[in-house]
Amino acid sequence: MIILYQFPISHFCEKARWALDYKGLEYKVKNLMPGAHIKAIKKLADKSTVPVIEHDGKIVQGSAEIINYLDGLSSDRPLTPVEPGARSAALEWEKYLDREIGVSIRCYCYHYLLTRPDQVVPMLAHHGPWYGKWLLRLGFGKLSKIMRKHMLINDETAADALNRIRAALARINERVGTDGYLVGDYFTRADLTAASLLTPFLQPESFDIPWPQDPPPALAQTVKELEPQLEWARRIYARYR
């Protein structure tokens, strides 16, 4: 049995969950508490980041490496193209999207959400232990400072992150047109990566997270402005997730 160590809120973990579900693989989820997760993950892997999967004595860390492993584990519904040129293109898109959307959208969203513990604590504690909300509220000031320092979140980096997100969305939409794909004419890990990493803006109902009903105004305004550029990702999510 595959065990997935994750944060329910994480869009990188959603990327791994989507890959597991798309390929029809059975797995068990172990939800971790941000901050408290470090000790548990460091027992398994070199870094403290999630997602991590454990399977048959093997530990695989990181969403891209997990997709590599899953495609090697099962040839059903492959996410990585076989043809060398398409494979290289899909991997390049994934690397670009992990950096320009994955890291950037995390920075931008947390810059505003960390100012609203009433909104972000329920998201961070979702599906965690019963004491999760209480513990996170108690130590939120310290956790917020750690997150901002570790993920380099401040006014300047948030502004830069938004510029990167806009540029990445423009590049995606230029490539896919109305109903196309990022690589070739079929669904690949590139499309999965783009849609999954945009979930903080898409907020699909199937992504089981208590999204804020009244998000910080700047964040809400950004999502509204970018909505036309999110339509392709919504269709990918609806069709393949």
Image (cartoon, helix red, strand yellow):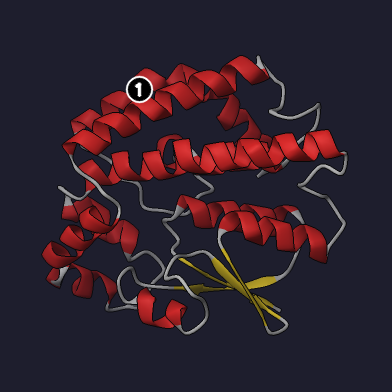
According to the image, label 1 marks what residue? 224
What amino acid does circle 1 point to?
Lys
Q: Is residue 4 left or right of residue 77?
A: left
In percent of width and height, residue 231 lies at 54, 23
Residue ID at (13%, 72%): 138
In percent of width and height, residue 7 lies at 43, 64
Front residue of this view, candidates 108 and 28: 108
- Which part of the image, by quadrant, shows the N terminus? bottom right
Residue ID at (19%, 42%): 154
Q: What element does badge 1 sit on?
A: helix
191 to 114, vertically: above or below: above
Front residue of this view, candidates 65 and 188: 65
Q: Is residue 172 left or right of residue 213?
A: right
In percent of width and height, residue 206 lies at 54, 48
51 to 130, vertically: above or below: above
Front residue of this view, candidates 1 and 40: 40
Q: How many marks?
A: 1
Q: Is residue 207 left or right of residue 113?
A: right
Query: Would you say residue 75 is visible in this rendering?
Result: yes
186 to 169, vertically: above or below: below
In percent of width and height, residue 105 lies at 38, 39
Residue ID at (73%, 82%): 56
Query: Would you say residue 223 is visible in this rendering?
Result: no
Residue ID at (52%, 81%): 44
Q: Residues within 10 Å of mark 1 (few under 14, many from 20)?
A: few
- Which part of the image, by quadrant, shows the C terminus? top right
